[in-house]
Image (cartoon, rainbow, N blue to C red):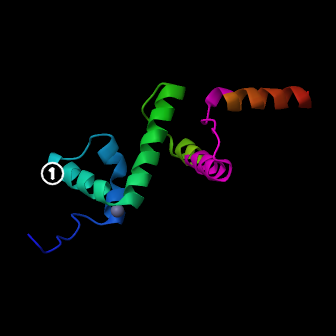
Amino acid sequence: MTGEEPRPSDCSEVLDHLYEYLDHEMPDGDSDKMREHIDECSPCLEKYGLEQAVKQLVKRCCGHDDVPSDLRAKVLERIDAIREDESRAAGPAGEPDCREAQSRQEAQDRQEA
Ligand SMILES: [Zn+2]
């Protein structure tokens, strides 16, 4: 085998179906193709890792599987910010934490009162 086979699916297709893949809602053949692509394609792997992190985070913080799209966007923003901080400071970075955000909000409310 010498010829390079084309990737089983292209990046936009993989990213379009990332949530189905994460939720195991894909037919076996399709999810195999997804995994092959993600294994070989670092941009998709990175995106996949982020989405997985978001799902786990939401599950841990809020105790359910559904990721409201606005929350997902916020968490992804937060993760991006953390990753920027990490690359700048190369130090330990905090995880986005629901309680932390809440207590910060409470402190703000108290100041305003
Ligand atoms: Zn890709």
- Coordinates of residue 108 in the picture (x, y in percent): 83, 32
The stretch drawn in magenta includes residue 17:
no
Residue 107 at what x, y percent from top left?
A: 82, 27
Numbered marks: total: 1
Residue 11 pos. (x, y %): 34, 64
- Please name the residue shown 59% across and 51% down the image: 80
Q: Quadrant of ligand 1?
A: bottom left
In this image, 95 relative to 26: left or right?
right
Q: With respect to residue 72, does 101 lie above or below?
A: above
Q: Hey, which residue is sitting farthest left in the picture?
A: 1
In the image: residue 58, left or right of residue 37: right
Judge from the rendering whether residue 47 lies leftward or rightward of residue 107; answer left or right: left
Left or right side of 71 for 63: left
Secondary structure, mark 1, is helix
Q: Quadrant of residue 105?
A: top right
Query: Is residue 10 positioned above or below 46 on the image?
Result: below
User: For the N terminus, which image quadrant?
Assistant: bottom left
Image quadrant in which the C terminus is located? top right
Tell me: is circle 1 under 8 Å from ligand 1: no
Structural crowding at the residue carrying mark 1, measured as other residues with C-alpha within 10 Å and reported as few (<14), some (14–19) or many (≥20)? few
Q: Main secondary structure of the magenta part?
A: helix
Residue at image mark 1? 29
Measuring 43% from the left and 53% from the top, which residue is drawn there?
A: 46
Q: Is residue 77 magenta?
A: yes
Residue nearest the viewer, comparing 48 with 69: 48
What are the residue bounds of the magenta stretch? 76-99
**Residue 21 x, y percent position in the rendering:** 30, 46
Q: For the view shown, which residue lies furthest in the bottom direction?
A: 3
Q: Name the amino acid type tagged 1.
A: Gly
Going 23% across and 46% down the picture, which residue do you hit? 26
Q: Residue at x 45, y 38 (%)?
A: 55
Q: Quadrant of residue 93?
A: top right
